[in-house]
């Protein structure tokens, strides 16, 4: 199982590096922040696991690109870098967590002397305690040591010394989950307050920020896409076994502007775990579902936030064909897409049912 998370982490890093490797760097900065918060009890099963306030430290290394690419001009020359987190859940059940991330920081008010910034990070996490039927049966949040992790941080900066040294404070949301590769997997979400310091190496004044009005908007036709996704996952039944799944999707997308595209299409799901899950339900609940009719089909609409050859995808769908409803007929998909050339693209996405993870998907697609 560890190899899937390692593959995911390095795939994300490579994908992000591919679309940004030509950017010239002008300065770096180092940031550290301490935080205190509390995990969200989004399920009553977590009642015993959440025992107090959580605390930790987040450190990051940032750099900024200065070339006048469309991406930099559209997004106010964002910072990018790597960050690392240590979190103590202050719980004998949940233990401690470590995380490593690739992150982007967007300047929401770039021309203000006291800027407001938004940082998003995605990477790999390690938790010291997981579910064990004998030694840790109350940890229904995490079923494996290695997990996918992500965070969002809204931060306000107050400069202290000639725009070099600053304090930062704000709110953050930190998430750990193994995306149902191993159950239980309710996941852990922590909302925190943070305060820290940031120091810049170099002179930011050399950045040549050009007006967004100089960017050309070229009308684009509707494109059609075919995507094959796959991976491994386990049903909600603990220790029910890990099975392969395959998803075939066909959808249309229409680019609205330099930022956004709308999508709509259809999904066909072949999830082997569901066959085993139906058989389990028939045995334990005396049901008569046809275990061989486990395939599903759904329709969806979505959005793509474009950043050069890299996009963040979000979709919401409805399963219109299913013999057995697994969790919910409503499903969502969130992920990352990287355009390899004019036609081929790769994807990493998370399929969830009413915000409960079902599968981590690795995909390859073709744009017509």
Image (cartoon, helix red, strand yellow):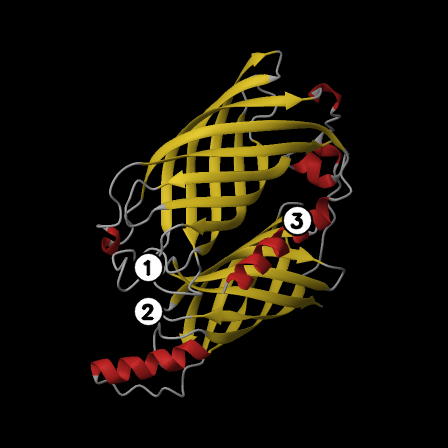
Q: Is residue 26 above or below residue 97?
A: above
Residue carrying label 1: 131
Element type where label 1 sits in the image = loop
Q: Quadrant of the C terminus?
A: bottom right
> Residue 363 in the image: x percent, y percent?
60, 66
Element type where label 3 sits in the image = helix
Tell me the crowding category of disc 2: few under 14, some 14 to 19, or many 20 or more residues within 10 angstroms, Cα based.
Answer: some
Element type where label 2 sits in the image = loop
> Residue 78 in the image: x percent, y percent?
64, 34
Q: Is residue 321 above or below residue 368?
A: below
Residue carrying label 3: 16
Q: Is residue 278 above or below residue 203?
A: below
Q: Outermost residue, top direction?
A: 161
> Residue 339 in the image: x percent, y percent?
70, 57
The answer for how far apart the CA atoms under marks 1 and 3 are is: 33 Å
Tell me the crowding category of disc 3: few under 14, some 14 to 19, or many 20 or more residues within 10 angstroms, Cα based.
Answer: many
Give the quadrant of residue 7.
Answer: bottom right
Q: Earlier in the sequence, mark 2 or mark 3?
A: 3
Which of discs 2 and 1 lies nearer the camera? The answer is 1
> Residue 211 in the image: x percent, y percent?
72, 29
The answer for how far apart the CA atoms under marks 2 and 3 are is: 34 Å
Residue carrying label 2: 238
């Amino acid at each position: 199982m560890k190899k899937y998370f390692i593959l995911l982490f390095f795939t994300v890093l490579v994908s992000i590096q591919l679309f940004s490797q030509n950017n010239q760097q002008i300065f770096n900065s180092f940031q550290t922040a301490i935080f205190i918060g509390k995990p969200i009890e989004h399920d009553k099963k977590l009642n015993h696991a959440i025992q107090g306030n959580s605390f930790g430290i987040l450190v990051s290394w940032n750099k900024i690109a200065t070339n006048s690419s469309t991406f930099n001009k559209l997004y106010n020359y964002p910072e990018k870098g790597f960050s690392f987190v240590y979190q103590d859940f202050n719980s004998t059940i949940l233990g401690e967590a470590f995380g490593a991330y690739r992150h982007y920081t967007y300047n929401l008010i770039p021309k203000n002397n006291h800027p407001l910034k938004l940082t998003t990070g995605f990477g790999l996490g390690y938790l010291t305690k997981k579910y064990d039927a004998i030694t840790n049966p109350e940890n229904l949040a995490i079923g494996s040591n290695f997990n996918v992790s992500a965070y969002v941080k809204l931060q306000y900066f107050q400069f202290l010394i000639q725009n070099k040294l600053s304090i930062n404070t704000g709110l953050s949301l930190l998430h750990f989950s193994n995306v149902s590769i191993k159950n239980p997997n309710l996941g852990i979400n922590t909302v925190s307050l943070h305060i820290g310091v940031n120091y810049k190496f170099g002179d930011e004044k050399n950045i040549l920020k050009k007006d967004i009005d100089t960017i050309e908007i070229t009308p684009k036709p509707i494109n059609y896409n075919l995507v094959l996704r796959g991976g491994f996952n386990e049903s909600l039944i603990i220790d029910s076994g890990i099975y392969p799944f395959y998803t075939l999707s066909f959808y249309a997308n229409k680019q609205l502007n330099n930022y956004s595209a709308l999508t709509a299409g259809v999904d066909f799901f072949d999830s082997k775990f569901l066959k085993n899950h139906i058989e389990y339900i028939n045995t334990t609940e005396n049901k008569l579902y046809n275990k061989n009719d486990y395939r599903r089909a759904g329709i969806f609409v979505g959005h793509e936030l474009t950043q050069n050859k890299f996009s963040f995808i979000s979709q919401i769908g409805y399963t219109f064909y299913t013999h057995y409803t697994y969790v919910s007929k409503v499903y969502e998909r969130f992920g990352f897409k990287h355009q390899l050339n004019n036609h081929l693209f790769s994807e990493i996405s998370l399929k969830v049912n009413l915000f409960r993870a079902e599968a981590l998907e690795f995909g390859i697609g073709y744009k017509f």
